[in-house]
Image: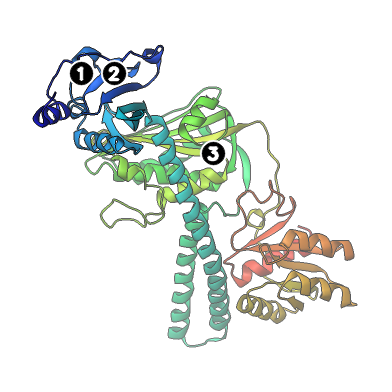
Amino acid sequence: MISREGEEDRAEGGRLEPDALAPLPAGFAQLPAVVWSTDRHLSLSWVTGALLDVLRISPGEVVGRGVGDFFRRFGAELHALSAHRRALGRNAIRFEFEAEKRIYEAHVVPQLDGDVVGTIGLAIDVSETRVLQDQLRAAQRMESIGRLAGGIAHDFNNLLTVIESCSAILASRLTDEKAVEDVELIRGMARKAGDLVAQLLAFARRQVRKPEVICLNAVVADLSKMLERVIGEDVKLKTAPTAGLGRVMVDRGQLDQVLMNLVVNARDAMPNGGQIAIECRNVYMDEAYIDRHAAGVPGPYVMLAVSDTGVGMDRQTQARIFEPFFTNKAGRGTGLGLATVYGIVKQSGGFVWVYSEPGRGSTFKVYLPRVEDAPSRRDSRSQPAIRSIGGDETILLVEDDDDLRRVTRRILMARGYTILEARNAGDALLLCERYTGKIDLLLTDVVMPQMNGRELSHRIRSLRPDVSVVYMSGYPDGAAVEQGLVDLDAVYLAKPFTPPQLLDCLRLALDGI
């Protein structure tokens, strides 16, 4: 008979030789786990499993000791004792502990032989699973933030277009210089707000893009002089072109923005100077790598890496660096630089990976899919500027934002155009069927309730094949052309726009330039 004191000693770690050990189940020693059994006094009857070698434990060291003593070396004594005592009460309990920089999940259940005679426990390594779960939660959080940012940016672009357009109309009517200066200040602030919205759209992957086939060697070479001026004399920039580097399909302006933001971020991490290295090389991502990092699809990529010798980051900071407005720069910056990088890269079909340790610098790796060739499309931004003139053509204006539709109509009517306006696709189709005159151009928003701009343009062209089309968009999807949301040869008018940009864009489409 064992006294109560003996029971407590054994549960808490005192060593007692068992009278008879339970037979060890065959094959348990090969399991990639740790498996153990205790009696009802929580003394270990046996312990086995392949992970014992990883944990540097010999069964002879622990058999006969209390389960609390076994888990004390991992700092999980109290959790283990609580779990095993609850298992004696016929509960199945789970807890976690760390050992050798790995995370283990332990499951404890009652051992029954008519009555509860002890417990059975099993611990498995869940480190990789926890990493993937954290990555999935981070991806879901970023996606939710992206949807919110895109929606906010869309609404703000409509508001900014109205502010910019009305300010321009007001400025053209004023003669008082002070009043004109005030209006121009409003317009300037609207443009700055538009720049911030553009960064939100980049994060949300809803920027208007002009993809082209590019070699990253050329991009780095073209920007190196500018980057050297940006980082200052106390930071050394090191670049090395890679022979035979593959090509990628991205918007060149966006890619310049990615590289610039990464280099500026690296510079800010080195307040006392240091070195930034830019590297490009071909890589192939297999399924194992993609699964481990929960990003992208297997295949050939081109990697752009920007490394610094700065202060580095801990894991908590790394988990949030791509979130909009998050910054650890003590009040400097908007917190949109890395968020913009994230959005542009994702929009281009790639992904970003970061490795950093406090005091040992950081490396940001951008992976972009390797391509051979790419389609091109018309974009109003790539066309030569023309005089902001009007015309006598008839334009069907479709926009669900009442204020924006109203100010757009005023601008166009002031330049001689005949305007038919509709709040949605249904009204536009009805107008198109009932109007007996010629309709020269359809000016439509891309994203509308019930029917998008592309679907509307196809319906109208089935009725009037000669009509030209211009898409207005506050946030066209980043892969709009590839996903078929707009036509390949479509002319874009990106919001927020100014009256001259609106007039120029319409003339481009009407004159077939």
Instruction: Indicate the amino acid at tag 2.
Output: Val
Q: Which residue lies furthest to the right in this view?
A: 436
Query: Which marked residue is nearer to the observer: mark 1 or mark 3?
Result: 1
Quadrant for the C terminus, please: bottom right
Marks 1/2 in contact by CB < 8 Å: the verdict is yes
Which residue lies at the image location 38% right of the left edge and 30% below the top edge? Answer: 126
Q: Mark 1 points at which residue?
A: 62
Quadrant of the drawing holding the N terminus: top left
| Placement of 241 over or under 141, stated as above or below | above
Residue 288 screen position, x and y as percent: 51, 25
The image's mark for residue 221 is none
Decide which of 138, 103 is in the foreground and name it.
103
Q: Where is residue 427 in the image (x, y as percent from the top left)?
A: 77, 75
Q: Mark 3 points at which residue?
A: 350
The answer to whether mark 3 and mark 2 are in CB contact below 8 A is no
Disc count in the image?
3
Q: Residues within 10 Å of mark 3 (few under 14, many from 20)?
A: many
User: In the rendered structure, which amino acid carries the disc numbered 3?
Assistant: Gly
Task: Please determine whether, in this image, residue 153 is positioned above or below residue 80.
Answer: below
Q: How crowded is mark 1: few (under 14 residues within 10 Å), some or many (20 or more)?
A: some
Report how far apart the C-alphas of labels 1 and 2 lie in the structure. 8 Å
At 77% from the left edge and 67% from the top edge, which residue is drawn? 442
Q: What element carries label 1?
A: helix
Q: Which of 270 and 294 is in front in this view?
A: 294
> Residue 204: x, y in percent?
52, 54
Of the two numbered discs 1 and 3 on the same chain, state the one appearing first in sequence. Answer: 1
Question: Which numbered disc flags the more N-terminal residue, 3 or 2?
Answer: 2
From the viewer's perspective, is 87 left or right of 467?
A: left
Would you say residue 287 is visible in this rendering?
Answer: yes
Marks 3 and 2, how far apart at CA:
47 Å
Residue beneath disc 2: 47
Residue 496 vertical position relative to residue 404 in the rendered view, above or below: above
